[in-house]
Amino acid sequence: MKKLAVCCLALTLPLSLIAADRDVNRDGWINQADVTALARMVAGIDPVDLRYDQDGDGALTLEDVNHVLDATAQGPISSSTTTATPHTPPPSQSTGGMDFYAVRQKGTGQCVVVVGDEGISPGDTVYGVFPSFPEAQDLLTSRCNQGPATPTSTNIVSGLPLSTDRLYRPDKTITRGKWGTATHIGGDANLKSKVNERGFVVEDGFFVAPGHGGDTEILWSHDGSETTLSGAATVIDCIDYCGRAGSIEFFIRGDGRDLWAGGLVRQGDPARTFSVSLSGIHEVRLVITDGGNGVDEDWGGWLNLKVGAPGAPPAAATAPPSLGRTTQGAFPPILAIPKFDNDDSTRGIFSIELESGKGTLINRVRKTPLDVQIHPMRHNFFQAIGRRPGQSALQGQILIGPIRKGGGRVHALLIVDTTTGKMGYLTDLDDDPARGKLKMIDGAPAQAMATEDGNYALVMRRSGSGKTLGAYLYHGTTGRCRIFKDIGNLSSAITSSPTTTLPKIDAGVSSLEIQAGSDATSNVLLIDPSSGTLYLIGDIEHKPTQLTVRTLSLNIVEAFPQRPKVLSPQRFLPIPITDRSGATSSALIVDVGSGALALLDNIRKPSKIRMIGIKGSIYDVLKEDVGRPRTITAVPKIDDTGATEAAWLFDSATGTILFINNLQDPGNLVLRLVNKRNGD
């Protein structure tokens, strides 16, 4: 539908002199505000109201806008552009929304987007008015890039920087249909007490609910300056009655694109915290949806919102120490990647801190797995993906996978930044792995899948010879998956292809690469921590883009406590157990939330798969009460026959390494702490 050009006019006429059906904004006057309001309906920006059908043809068109404009004695509006007349409209003339004007300034000849009509000067050409910055900018791009005398640059010239004070006075709220709500909590003690998470302290926020007509949005303008928006999103307790049906999807959008996606949050789930950069952003929207199952009990909260300096930590839930949460948020995650040798045995471990990008090489793991040496890596891993060293990342925002030669030896690492889509390598790991070399991959191959939510899995695809052929990047929130080729050759120009869409997993997805006896990757297991559903992804070896999905009858949650005592962004940690042929026969499942252990047996035989509980807990050895959410990652210890003997667990909360021995005899596991010593 054609967007109309709307300008700002000065003349107003008393309602008594003209027809009542031209007073579109019902303020008792026929003026430019009515022209603007009706033009927005015709352009499809606002809902159509046929009470303002001026010519009685049963539709709202440009002619109806011209009828209202005639009543202001200013003549008909052009279907393309108009020249602005200066005015300062009183508050009563506001349309009640935040308008973005596409303007060519007379004085400078520059094309700009202006927030609100106060920034429009006499003689400026107004091409159109829109509800969002991207729409106004798109029009300027098409208009102002035509002809040699026309300026080609566009920018924002009006709009204040977003601040914490302005957060609780939004420029606009949008509710659609019955039950849609966006209410400032302020000092409402009743709403503050309804947050359905024990120990969460609500300072301020918005009580929100989607309506029967669609999403609920809260909008602000911003001047594009560098700052961060932080806070938490959660489903709060029902006001009077709760049947645990509430589920909401939370999004933060800037200039029409997702800056953060919190995924589906159900009643009883922990709050999702965020810290989002607003650098270069001119329109900010907090958006909630009904989660796809209607609006029943969908009471949500955008809580403890703050605007702070770049890199400010996100707001987080506070709780007693026994719940494992404090206001400081989660402990910085640690990644651990195995360094396999030609015989597939574990030769060393690469450990990477996602707070800084610093890495260490852990040696002497084969002969003395309880007494290892630590060597600092020469390069910062973040440099391979163009990320500033020290620019901390959350769980799932940086992923690393081993790249193996034929025979299985790891000679490089693939590094992926899921917030930008950039990729890179750490190469030359054969002889002196602590030194290595950085190599960036051209462009941002995974940019189309990039988000801030960290809900990703990276799975390396191997051939029957053990060589890495490619890598799958799976986004649980959307179910999208792509395979990236040419990885094994360390190419700087890689190609990718979309695969079959996989199941959506709202948050905290875990994955397990399953190997056939030939060393080829045959399947991948995906774990949904919310529902406990297990998905077996097949045809990886023979049809890498046409994947099959099988939902297993076994539910993993049934083997563990329903409400974990310890919070973690990734609750379930699967550790592959291979036999002497190198085939994955089973997996040790570690529940980070409770510390419990279980064996997932017959993993390559879906009809015979079963879960076997194992006595003991990782918190028999590790400290359970650490006051903050933790992440744990694992590296299997494989011997020279290809069989998994044991595994090392890396705990982000304490910095300790836990060794679990006797994985071939899960009924007699032995758990011990590892002694770490600095290498020469």
Image (spheres, helix red, strand yellow):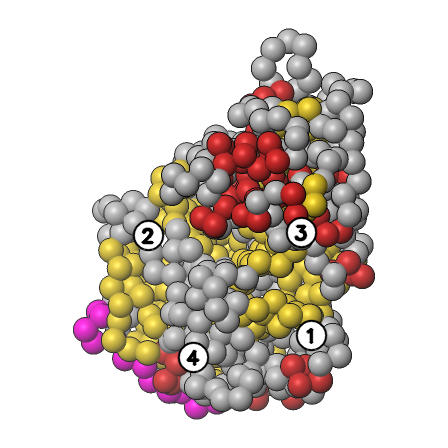
- The stretch of residues the image draws in magenta is 605-616
Question: Earlier along the polypeptide chain: callout 4 or callout 2?
Answer: 4
On screen, residue 209 above or below 51:
below
Q: Which residue is mark 3?
A: 28
Residue 185's mark? 1
The picture quadrant where one finds residue 384 is: top right
Residue 614 inside the magenta-drawn segment: yes
Q: Which residue is mark 2?
A: 501
Q: Residues under labels 4 and 1: Cα distance?
A: 23 Å
Q: For marks 2 and 3, give the one nearer the viewer.
A: 3
Q: Name the kind of residue labelled 3 in the image.
A: Gly
Q: In the visual, does 183 lie left or right of 258?
A: right
Q: Name the kind of residue labelled 1 in the image.
A: Ile
Percent x, y for residue 593?
53, 80
Question: Earlier along the polypeptide chain: callout 1 or callout 3?
Answer: 3
Q: Name the kind of residue labelled 2 in the image.
A: Thr
Question: Earlier along the polypeptide chain: callout 2 or callout 3?
Answer: 3
Residue 381 visible in the shown view: no
The answer to whether the residue labelled 4 contacts the one labelled 3, judged by CB atoms less than 8 Å apart, is: no
Residue 492 visible in the shown view: yes
Q: Residues under labels 4 and 3: Cα distance?
A: 45 Å
The answer to whether the residue labelled 4 contacts the one labelled 1, judged by CB atoms less than 8 Å apart, is: no
Q: Residues under labels 1 and 3: Cα distance?
A: 33 Å
Question: Earlier along the polypeptide chain: callout 2 or callout 1?
Answer: 1
Q: For marks 1 and 3, give the one nearer the viewer.
A: 3
Question: Observer-nearest residue: 320 or 126?
Answer: 126
Residue 245's mark? 4
Crowd rating for badge 3 (residues with CA inside 10 Å; few <14, some 14–19, many 20+): some
